[in-house]
Image (spheres, helix red, strand yellow):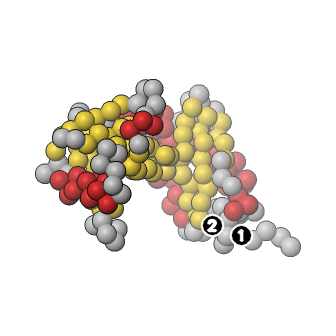
Amino acid sequence: MAVMIHPLLSITPDARSKIDSVRDFNNFPEAVVRVRVLAREGRRFRYEIALEDPRERADGDVSVEADGLTVVVDAASAADLAGATIELDPTVTGGGLRIDNPNEGWQDPVARAVQEVIDRQINPGVGSHGGQVTLVDVKDGTAYMRFGGGCQGCAAVNVTLKQGVETAVRAAVPSVTAIIDVTDHDAGENPYYQHGH
């Protein structure tokens, strides 16, 4: 059973034991645990969990104290971590940590609506070509998307974006007035459509 260390976070006993053993192994018993949301990848978050010197805390950090353990969360990550649990990840050799987060999904109703269009209309189509579209963010009427798999580096990605993705999203979510492709297409390794020689 996870121990609630603050309304923000809970930690399982196994995860706490792992943290304590890593602090002991590194002879750093006063180390705090830094938890940060690095990025949103569609409906999920990508996290960083690391030991940190307690003197490295920044203004605005939220500190959670429990039984000699301090967990530090930056203010920007705190809202996305409310109610999350730090737990042991049994899939990692030696036992790593992972976050079980009830907030994995879009809180913003416009972003939630765009995600639904991606899930129901766009990804089933581009998935047949080995592609995937991920919503990165929605701000001020602009949806930022990343094209992965066969879409990354694809010569037809502009057609897909303009005729497929943009048309579908703007029809379903009229408050979205622009879509920006934030993909690094030069990094695509095995695109479905190869560039001409």
Which numbered dot is residue 95?
Answer: none
Task: Please state the horizontal and vertical placement of residue 85, each as a whole percent of the image.
Answer: 26, 47
Task: Please state the horizontal and vertical placement of residue 83, each as a whole percent of the image.
Answer: 27, 39
Gap in Å between the C-alphas at discs 1 and 2? 7 Å
Mark 1 packing: few (<14 Cα in 10 Å), some, or many (20+)? Answer: some
Task: Please state the horizontal and vertical placement of residue 47, each as a whole percent of the image.
Answer: 43, 49
Q: Which residue type carries mark 1?
A: Tyr
The residue where tag 2 is placed is 150
Q: Residue at x 46, y 31 (%)?
A: 58
Look at the image and tell me whether residue 24 can be seen: yes
The residue where tag 1 is placed is 193
At mark 2, the secondary structure is loop
Q: Which residue type carries mark 2?
A: Gly
Look at the image and tell me whether residue 102 can be seen: no
Does residue 45 appear to the left or right of 67 in the view shown? right
Task: Tell me whether the residue at label 1 lies in contact with that at label 2, contact meaning CB atoms closer than 8 angstroms.
Answer: yes
At mark 1, the secondary structure is loop
